[in-house]
Image: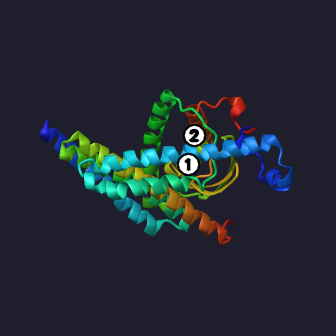
């Protein structure tokens, strides 16, 4: 059982790290500020969620899932809020066209 | 339409010396809505703190003041109408959101690897969801779901940045709005039309 959890945990963590790396690549490659924000808000949230789930599997204790879950929710909400604020500030500079 | 959807201009044009009884009732309702929001937020913050620091009782010396400050800050936000959440709607929305977040991450990863497939632009979207929780959740969920980002909110008008301007994106936005309406048990009459 422990081995299965470790394999699942490592797999989820690997996928999560991959999402974060691709998000970083997106910030570099995507053409404008708003498109880059998509990479930051979406791939970041999913990447962190998978890493947290993987970490909970590796830890093997249910209580760690609660704390890691709360971290994921708070990071996702703050990412979305900051993403919106940056987008709004960008539009207020007159770049809507 | 709820009492919180009264246009601000009406309140400004009414002289305070001739305040009518129904306006006092509205003011009390608004302030009680804020109080309810403050208590709910303070309780949620206490639960969150307990989740993070359940094994460290001394941490409450910081946690309690932070929960009180967080709850007090809500008093400065606009009050929202009391709405009922549907338990079944919550489960359906959670499933919809988890699948949407993962699809969003895969979608933006694909675009990051091949930026030439992008057709970005803006979609103006007039939401029929009422002010407060439903509209805020809609704005947050738009940013987490595939290819869309809430760039500006002006009353019921949202400016959404989309990586793909096809009809599929508009259909996804309509589906999201319908999910949130079901979550808050909003029927056709309660939607802002």
Q: Is residue B64 left or right of residue B163?
A: left
Q: Is the residue at mark 2 from the same chain as the one at mark 1?
A: yes
Sequence order check, earlier mark of 2 and 1: 1
Q: Secondary structure at mark 2?
A: helix
At horizontal 45% and vertical 31% (from top left) the residue drawn is: B91
> Which residue occupies the extreme front position in the image?
B17
- State the mark number for residue B172: none
Query: For the residue carrying disc 2, how many other residues have a C-alpha within 10 Å: few (<14), some (14-19), or many (20+)?
Result: many
Q: What's the residue at 62%, 43% (across, down)?
A: B32
User: Is B186 left, or right, of B93 in this rendering?
Assistant: right
Q: Are marks 2 and 1 in contact (CB under 8 Å)?
A: yes
- In space, the residues marked 2 and 1 are separated at their CA atoms by 8 Å
Q: Chain of mark 2?
A: B
Q: Is residue A42 left or right of residue B8?
A: left
Give the x, y percent position of residue A32.
Answer: 55, 68
The percent coordinates of residue A9 (x first, y second) are: 22, 46
Residue A48 seen in the current view: yes
Instruction: Reply above or below: B89 against B22.
Output: above
B117 vs B169, nearest the viewer: B169
Q: Position of residue A70 (x, y in %)?
A: 36, 48
Residue located at (41% from left, 53% from top):
A74
Image position of B163 with respect to A92: above or below: above
- Image quadrant assignment for residue A89: bottom right
Q: Residue drawn at (44%, 40%), measured in percent from left and top?
A: B99
* Secondary element at tag 1: helix
The quarter of the rendered structure image containing the N terminus of chain A is top left
Tag shown at residue B142 = 1
Direction bottom: furthest residue:
A93
Task: Write down the residue under mark 2.
Answer: B176
Q: Is residue B87 left or right of residue B187?
A: left
Give the percent coordinates (x, y) of residue B45: 42, 49
């Amino acid at each position: 059982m422990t081995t299965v959890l470790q394999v699942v945990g490592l797999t989820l963590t690997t996928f999560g790290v991959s999402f974060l790396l691709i998000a970083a690549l997106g910030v570099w490659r995507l053409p404008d500020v708003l498109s880059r924000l998509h990479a930051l808000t979406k791939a970041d949230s999913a990447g962190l969620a998978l890493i947290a789930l993987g970490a909970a599997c590796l830890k093997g204790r249910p209580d760690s899932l609660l704390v890691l879950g709360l971290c994921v929710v708070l990071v996702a909400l703050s990412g979305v809020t900051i993403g919106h604020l940056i987008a709004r500030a960008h539009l207020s500079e007159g770049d809507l066209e | 339409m709820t009492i919180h959807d009264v246009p601000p201009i009406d309140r400004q044009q009414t002289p305070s010396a001739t305040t009518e009884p129904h306006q006092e009732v509205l003011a009390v309702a608004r302030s009680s809505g804020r109080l309810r929001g403050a208590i709910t937020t303070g309780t949620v913050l206490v639960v969150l703190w307990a989740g993070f620091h359940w094994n460290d009782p001394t941490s409450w010396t910081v946690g309690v003041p932070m929960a009180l400050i967080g709850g007090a800050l809500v008093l400065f936000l606009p009050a929202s109408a009391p709405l009922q959440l549907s338990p079944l709607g919550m489960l359906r929305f959670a499933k919809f959101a988890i699948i949407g977040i993962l699809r969003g991450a895969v979608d933006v990863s694909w675009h990051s690897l091949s930026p030439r497939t992008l057709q970005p632009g803006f979609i103006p979207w007039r939401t029929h969801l009422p002010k407060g929780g439903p509209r805020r959740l809609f704005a947050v969920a738009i940013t987490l779901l595939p290819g869309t980002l809430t760039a500006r909110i002006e009353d019921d008008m949202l400016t959404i940045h989309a990586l793909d301007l096809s009809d599929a994106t508009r259909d996804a936005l309509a589906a999201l709005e319908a999910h949130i309406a079901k979550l808050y048990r909003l029927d056709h009459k309660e939607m802002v039309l």
